[in-house]
Image: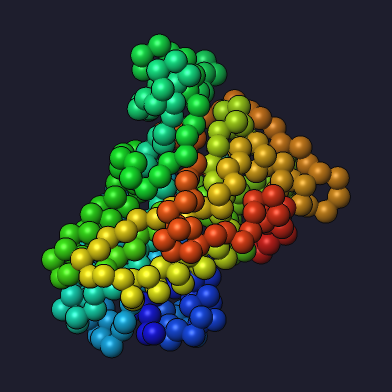
Amino acid sequence: MRVLLTGAAGFIGSAVADACRRAGHDVVGIDAYIPQAHRGEPRPGADVTGCDIRDGGEIALLVEDVDVVCHQAAMVGAGVSPADLPRYASHNDLGTATLLAAMAAAGVNRLVLASSMVVYGDGRYACPVHGERPAQPRELAELSSGVFDVRCPDCGTPMAWQLVAENAPLQPRSSYAASKVAQEHYAAAWARQLPGSVVALRYHNVYGPGMPADTPYSGVAAIFRSALERGEPPRVFEDGAQMRDFVHVDDVAAANVRAIAAVASGPADSFAPYNVSSGSPISIADVARLVGAGVPGPPVEPVVTGEFRVGDVRHIVASPDKARSELGFDAAVLPADGLRRFALDPLRG
Ligand code: UD1
């Protein structure tokens, strides 16, 4: 198939491009080389055309004769400051809307959308006394006094994390998360109107070779890795018990290949979200230990600092079941292996 791949020069996009080519697809790669994702000067590669998806005229030409669009381009990160808001709205909301309009005009109605677990906000919790209860964002006063657990709104008991499935409520808590929810809503509306077929892949914490190094927008695995390179121990925030699902970029690429096949053969007028995860939840303290164990020489023990970032969620752990049963996606790389190897993977930037 002929696949238009946006964000093709990025950390995830370049892995998706390789996997698509290995699967026999003809990939048309485009990238806007935004500085937050690509440090320094734009450097168009041989396989990637410099193009900003907000340029409707250029997109209209590129989308002709395409079977599927795989949309990875985005301004990523957590939304560090309110000054970032217009960039999220512009690249992520307007960019996606422009792309969808160009696809509709060209009669292209198959889309794979890169989404994120950030759409779930605080995740899912159960109180030992009251059962499942909604999580409220944690208060600054609690965090400052070293109380990190999410508490039951009825009795204040610390609640345990539960696996989050795709039908969980969407509760964006950052500007980036708001833009990912918007992308999903635009894509779902587009699928109904055309009709079209959309698969939205909700990536959990992605890591692997080519990950951007230490910036405010980098994920924690790269931050730990950069600290180790400077000869410093990884600094683990809160008490280190916060849980995530770390998924290797090669598995994310494999999930995209499956999603492309699903939208190509799937019914029109469909919007289906899927968690993309390893299925092996891990604490941030264990992430730090594994990356520290992968560096040559004696393992470097992390430091648990008790620091916190207001706006961080406590736990967010995916259910991998729907992606497994409907897309046939099962992660091949488990965090225990991949994070150790990540200590020596090349980073970018
Ligand atoms: C990350 C991304 C988010 C993306 C999601 C899914 C960032 C900033 N966040 O969310 O955009 O959609 O993965 O792929 O890129 N921590 C430390 N030490 C540090 C830095 C962080 O212990 O030096 C802790 C944080 O407090 C948090 C955990 O590590 O508890 C994970 O942080 P982060 O990597 O930023 O990931 P998420 O917030 O899970």
From what the image shows, is residue 122 above or below residue 85?
above
The quarter of the picture where the N terminus appears is bottom left
Q: Quadrant of residue 200?
A: bottom left
Q: Is residue 222 visible?
A: yes
Vertical position of residue 59 compared to residue 328: above or below: below
Query: Would you place residue 206 above or below residue 257 in this image?
Result: above
Q: Is residue 139 left or right of residue 105?
A: right
Left or right of 141? Residue 229 is right
Image point (29%, 50%), residue name = 181
Residue located at (64% from left, 54% from top): 334
In front of the other: 7 or 40: 7
Q: Quadrant of the C terminus?
A: bottom right
Q: Is residue 162 left or right of residue 57?
A: right
Q: Residue 340: x percent and y percent? A: 72, 53
**Residue 62 makes an appearance in the image:** no
Q: Position of residue 59 (x, y in %)?
A: 26, 78
Pick whichever, 198 or 219, lies toward us: 198
**Front-lying residue, 161 or 228:** 161
Q: Residue furthest toward the top?
A: 155
Residue 94 drawn at (x, y percent): 23, 61
